[in-house]
Image: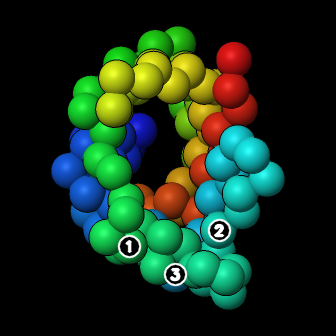
Amino acid sequence: MSRRTWAALCSSGAELLPLLSSNPVMIFPGDNVFTAASSPTLEQMLTNASYKPWKNYTLSHDEVIPLGESSALIYYRVEATRDDATFRAICSSVWLREGDSAQDWKMVSHQQTLF
C-alpha cells in the first residue's frame, strides 16, 4: 500500500485520491495538516497546479501492524527526490479495508516525520 501511495505521488497528486478514505487526515512537516475540511482541503492541495510530483523514492524498514481484520498501521522510512532536493522521513499510515479486494484498502491517516 505504501508503494502504491508513493508511485501515485510520483505521477501526480490527483493519482493519490482513489487511495484515500472519504475523510483522510494527512500531517506533513512544517505544521501542515490537510483534511476534507481544512483550508485548503487535502483534495485542493493534491490537485493544485503547483503540486510537484516526486521524481523517485525508496522505501525501507517497512512494517505492517494489523489493527483488526479490516485495518492496519504501516510505518516505514522513505527517501524521495524532486527538484534536486532529497526528502527523508519516517512515515506512518493507517489503512482501512472498505471491501474484499486488495484495491479496497483506503488511507485514513498519514504522517511524516523528518529525519
Q: Is residue 29 visible?
A: yes
Please report the residue visible at 25 percent of the width from the left and 33 percent of the height from the top: 55
Compared across the picture, whether 6 is left or right of 29 comes to left
Q: Is residue 59 above or below residue 83?
A: above
Q: Closer to the observer: label 3 or label 2?
A: 2
Residue 94: percent from the left, percent from the top? 61, 51
User: Which residue extends farthest left?
Assistant: 11
**Mark 1 Cα within 10 Å, few/some/many (few <14, many 20+)?**
some
Percent from the top left, x then y, of residue 77?
Answer: 55, 20
Decide if residue 37 is on the left or right side of residue 11. right
Could you tell me if residue 109 is visible in this image? Answer: no
Position of residue 110 relative to residue 115, above or below, is below
Query: Mark 3 Cα within 10 Å, few/some/many (few <14, many 20+)?
Result: few
Q: CA distance from mark 1 to mark 2?
A: 13 Å
Q: Categorize mark 2 by other alpha carbons within 10 Å: few (<14), some (14-19), many (20+).
A: many
Residue named by callout 2: 34
Residue of label 3: 22
Of the residues shown, which amino acid type is indicated by label 3? Ser
Q: Tag 3 or tag 1, which sits nearer the N-term? A: 3
Q: Which mark is residue 48?
A: 1
Specify the quadrant that holds the C terminus.
top right
